Amino acid sequence: MAFSVALISTGGTIEKTYDELHGVLQNNVSVLDAILASLTLEGAAITRVPLMNKDSLEMTEADHDLIARTADIMAEGHDGVVVCHGTDRLAVTGHRIHERLAARGRLRKAVVLTGAMRPYELRRTDSVQNLTEALCAVQVLAPGVYVAMHNRVLAFPGVRKDYDRMTFVRDGAG
Amino acid sequence: MAFSVALISTGGTIEKTYDELHGVLQNNVSVLDAILASLTLEGAAITRVPLMNKDSLEMTEADHDLIARTADIMAEGHDGVVVCHGTDRLAVTGHRIHERLAARGRLRKAVVLTGAMRPYELRRTDSVQNLTEALCAVQVLAPGVYVAMHNRVLAFPGVRKDYDRMTFVRDGAG
Amino acid sequence: MAFSVALISTGGTIEKTYDELHGVLQNNVSVLDAILASLTLEGAAITRVPLMNKDSLEMTEADHDLIARTADIMAEGHDGVVVCHGTDRLAVTGHRIHERLAARGRLRKAVVLTGAMRPYELRRTDSVQNLTEALCAVQVLAPGVYVAMHNRVLAFPGVRKDYDRMTFVRDGAG
Amino acid sequence: MAFSVALISTGGTIEKTYDELHGVLQNNVSVLDAILASLTLEGAAITRVPLMNKDSLEMTEADHDLIARTADIMAEGHDGVVVCHGTDRLAVTGHRIHERLAARGRLRKAVVLTGAMRPYELRRTDSVQNLTEALCAVQVLAPGVYVAMHNRVLAFPGVRKDYDRMTFVRDGAG
């Protein structure tokens, strides 16, 4: 019996693609399907939920709420939830999801957020590693809200992006 | 404080490299360092323990015992243990480690075995995914002996290689 | 007006793929289409001629003749010919083609042989470089028979494989 | 005797690298050495001439002249010259080099310009193909000034960038 995972995509660096004419990286097309196709997935039965495709710096309060509500709903019908998210506002959404699920007594599944510092389109990218970790961790973690990235799993609340080290750390960590 | 992991390498497909003169894949050089260098590792502090470099079909009883004894010792001094292993005899070693730790009342850490069906040297390889999963899972799993591979974590005892699907499954699974 | 190229494939290392069950590299499926798809080809209009798929060590005299006859025929109807070939017997076929075309006064197009020391399936392969060179050189070379590989173009006759340096050299070269 | 090539680098898309903090591709570090290291180069002995590292849209008249003078000088001391260049102004520099060498009666070597529409840092890049073609073509072309890219070699004068097809074409072509 496969473990059912709802994979909610919201955009961010992980999904940026290259525009040859203007020479910039943009959020136009979802690349998650390409990453999923490159992995061997025997554990999870994945349902793709393409919610939005935004650089997280452009997310509004309504966006954070929409993601939290969607994670909440998806957690009802699946064994776990993974959310792909731009890293700049990932912690805001992580806290929002935790707050919502805790307030409603619905911390009954693992919800794992992940993202990337370097787009999949790049030769050296952390996107494949991070999605691999999220899709593995969601199956073995206790109920709660987490970020899985760069070989580390951190539980919300109390997580922030460290712009010096370009990774996620616990609040108060160096 | 980083989570300390002893990474025991024993050879197998994951470490095979290509011999241009004879056109074959062989276990000569460890490629784990190349894989580790390609990952962003913020969670685990890894100690490399290069124990042997064998195609697991050539492993003797003494080899399985040596790996089990080494995993046992390493589990004492680290927060977790990962063992890279040829897939043909991975389940034999997994059961041996579980038997030894259970008999001695020392199932106090997570010991995660992994390997690959396709060498790292190949363009399409499962080795990076599998090592990524093992190095993530070892930090969040309860004490016990596991195989992490292909987006699935299975606990010993009761695991076997399925030669039709070329992955690991629970005993009795189709 | 695109330059028309007949691309004759005969097998060899360049086309070897990996057999997970037996852990060996074999000539089963043509991978040239995957390489071609990875290139941007604005110059040549390529006609694929999949003639055989053999490790060149297994080629018979009849095979060498068949390739030479096919190159001869294809040179009539195209602006140039590229032959992908196992490197062990590439020079035998190259001399055979040159002999045939010279004897019949038909050295009127460039015929470029190429191959690989490391299969395309490998992460580090010379196959893409070598096919790129052959498909470029065939458009600018004077009529004749050549091998293009490893950033060097050599004219037949007088070419051999150097097993120490694992590349092609002129007869008499060190 | 290796064929000596002066490889003049001027920047452009081919050399752009990714800035994690700002999420943009920039001309900071030369990546040509990484590309060269990935190729097997048995034909050319390459002398690197890192002249500038500019997006060609920012090149001044003085820049085009400097590149032309440098190509002229390097052609004296080498068997051939390759110039890596941003594609937006590549044709301006190509015509400048041709004009200079023709006016001085010094069209005695092949000078081959190349570049890329997609940076080397991208998973799918044309940079390796284009540099491979330039380093092969420079050894077999008659004296003159050319652009080698996308499996096509075009001689100056009379070459322009086609912004619809994102490649180089002859003036008057499609």
Image: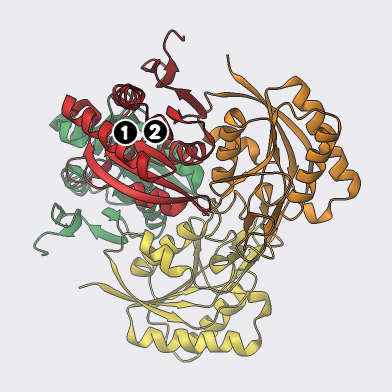
Chain colours: A green, B yellow, C orange, D red
Contact (CB < 8 A) between labels 1 and 2?
yes
Exactly how many numbered labels are in the figure?
A: 2
The answer to whether D30 is drawn above or below residue D137 in the figure is below
Coordinates of residue A56 in the picture (x, y in percent): 20, 36
- Towards the viewer: C116 or B78: C116
Give the residue furthest to the left: A172
Q: Residue at x 56, y 33 (%)?
A: C136
Residue at the disc numbered 2: D114
The N terminus of chain B appears in which quarter of the rendering? bottom left
Q: Residue at x 28, y 60 (%)?
A: A153
Coordinates of residue B101 in the picture (x, y in percent): 47, 86
Which SS class for mark 2? strand
Q: Label 2 sits on what residue type?
A: Thr
- Towards the viewer: C99 or A169: C99
Q: Residue at x 19, y 28 (%)?
A: D59
Residue at the disc numbered 1: D85
- Towards the viewer: A58 or C50: C50
The answer to whether B73 is drawn above or below residue D110 in the figure is below
Give the residue furthest to the front: D105
